[in-house]
Image (cartoon, helix red, strand yellow):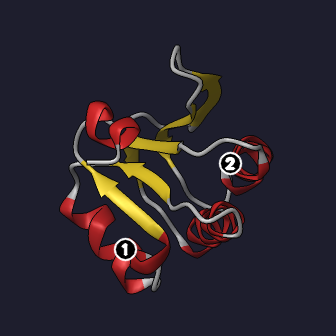
């Protein structure tokens, strides 16, 4: 069953990596909440920033723009934003928005935090 309301949370993992988890529809209604959670994490001094989109759906231009800005902030420090997803649709959206060069896509959290 799909979530009807987006839920976005930021946390620090035990190894010091920063993670933002987004669940539900990431459309224009969720863009401000995503920006408010993700951009400060992306700007933080941390080598690994993970965006967990495993339970997200419905990305639109507004949320892809936020993800793109976060990826740029991480890239400014010489790293790439790690995106956790198994959805071929989300991968196509990320590719279609031209973000592939700025992000690393992973299907597991272990891969995302380990850089595999």
Answer with the quarter of the image where residue 36 lies.
top right
Left or right? Give the position of 58 relative to 5.
left
Disc assigned to residue 110: none
Q: Say few, some or many: other residues with alpha carbon within 10 Å of mark 2 (under 14 / 14 to 19 / 20 or more).
A: many
Residue at point 74%, 44% (across, down): 33
Q: Position of residue 101 (x, y in %)?
A: 43, 79
Q: Position of residue 18 (x, y in %)?
A: 60, 33
| Residue identified by numbered label 1 | 93
Residue at point 37%, 61% (across, down): 104
Residue at point 51%, 62% (across, down): 80
Q: Position of residue 94 (x, y in %)?
A: 40, 72
Number of numbered discs visible in the structure rendering: 2
- Can residue 97 be seen at all in this image of the molecule? yes
Residue at point 72%, 64% (across, down): 73
Q: Say few, some or many: other residues with alpha carbon within 10 Å of mark 1 (under 14 / 14 to 19 / 20 or more).
A: some
Left or right? Give the position of 29 relative to 104.
right
Secondary structure type for disc 2 = helix
Secondary structure type for disc 1 = helix
| Residue identified by numbered label 2 | 34
Determine the residue located farthest toward the top in the rendered image. Answer: 14
Do the CB atoms of the residues marked 1 and 2 lie less than 8 Å apart? no
Is residue 11 depicted above or below 87 in this figure?
A: above
- Can residue 1 be seen at all in this image of the molecule? no
């Amino acid at each position: 069953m799909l979530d009807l309301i987006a839920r976005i949370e930021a946390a620090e993992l035990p190894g010091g990596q920063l993670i933002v988890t987004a669940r539900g529809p990431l459309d224009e209604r969720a863009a401000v909440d995503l920006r408010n959670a993700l951009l400060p994490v992306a700007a933080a001094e941390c080598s690994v920033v993970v965006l967990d989109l495993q339970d997200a759906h419905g990305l639109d231009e507004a949320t892809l723009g936020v993800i793109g800005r976060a990826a740029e902030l991480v890239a400014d420090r010489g790293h790439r934003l790690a995106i956790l997803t198994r959805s071929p649709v989300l991968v196509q959206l990320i590719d279609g928005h031209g973000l592939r060069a700025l992000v690393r896509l992973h299907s597991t959290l272990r891969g995302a935090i380990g850089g595999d």
